[in-house]
Image (cartoon, helix red, strand yellow):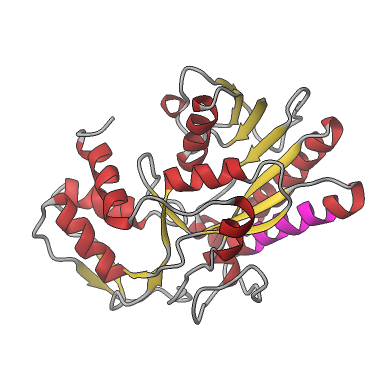
Amino acid sequence: MRAIVTGGAGFIGSHVVDALLARGDEVLVLDDLSNGKRENVPGGARLEVVDIREPLDFEGAEVCFHLGAQVDVRVAVDRPAHDAQVNVLGTINVLEAARAHGTQLVFASTGGAIYGECDGPVAEEAPRRPISPYGVSKLAGEEYLAAYNRLYGASHVSLRYANVYGPRQDPHGEAGVVSIFFGRLAAGEPPQIFGDGSQTRDYVYVGDVARATLAAAGKQGVFNVGTGSETSVLELYRLCRRVAGSELDPEHLDARLGEVQRSVLDATRVERELGWRPEVGLEEGLRRTWGSIAGSEP
């Protein structure tokens, strides 16, 4: 089929492009390259440099995987209007382009930033309590998709990703801690841990996320995409250090105001309805990621 990937030159988007090409699809990447990189777009895909807030043409596309976004929580806090322009108005613009040509949207949303503090693995029906403008803008995007489904009989789907990590990860995004840790270890600098490191996250490998994203095409609704398991920052660093063969101890800094202490997603629905489950364990995923940084893996 013909697929469009907004943000396809970025971290997760480029892996979605890889997966689409691997199964023989025709792929058009739309990216303004503000964070994405040309070299992330494989030769089999066509790249158009465009902002998702500009006029878009989806003619002939059966599905658009919408990963183009402002993803830095700190930018969202400092510049909430800019965050909303990209993540809310940009998504509306993408929805209108999809509506004009009957294209389905698969929307990349977020679990951790939407649910807020968790007391265990949270299912899709759990209360949404975002504590950052980024989480609010992503939740608004989900609600626009749901409204278009009701209003126009569309079949758009939202995916709430857990903390995605892997090769090509930008250390400035929502879940860039793995990239930050490995970047500092590669430079021989001690990584920084805010607070005591007991805060936990659900880390899911980017290749698994790409598979879930493709599996969502043709479906409808909201799905968590995570492992259902949580790992503390201290444990994550212990694994990163072991994988990198480093003896560096971390530097502890004051805890950051408003940081969620516990975030983990219940992935029961995505397994039941999409037949997806994560295949790459955390340590193996970290080895693949370190290999891409250290040059031992393409």
Task: Give me the residue at 22% from left, 56% from top.
Answer: 240
Query: Per the image, is 141 magenta?
Result: yes
Q: Residue furthest left?
A: 247
In-front residue for pair 49/3: 3
* Relative height, residue 253 to residue 40 (above, below): below
Compared to 157, does 248 lie above or below? below
Relative to residue 174, is residue 5 drawn left or right?
A: right
Q: Is residue 194 left or right of residue 130?
A: left
Between residue 69 and residue 59, name the one nearer to us.
59
Estimate the x, y position of residue 170 in percent, counting from the top left.
Answer: 40, 45
Q: Which residues lie in the magenta part?
A: 136-148
Residue placed at 51% from the left, 43% from the top?
Answer: 211
The reply to whether the magenta stretch includes residue 111 is no
Magenta residues, dominant SS class: helix
* Quadrant position of the N terminus in the picture: top right
Q: Can you give x and y, in whole percent of width and height, for residue 109 in the image?
A: 61, 54
Looking at this view, name the residue that lies furthest to the right: 151
Farthest residue, direction bottom: 119
Residue name at image x 29 percent, y 74 percent: 197
Count the marks: 0
For the question of whether residue 95 can be seen, the reply is: yes
The answer to which quarter of the image holds residue 225 is bottom right
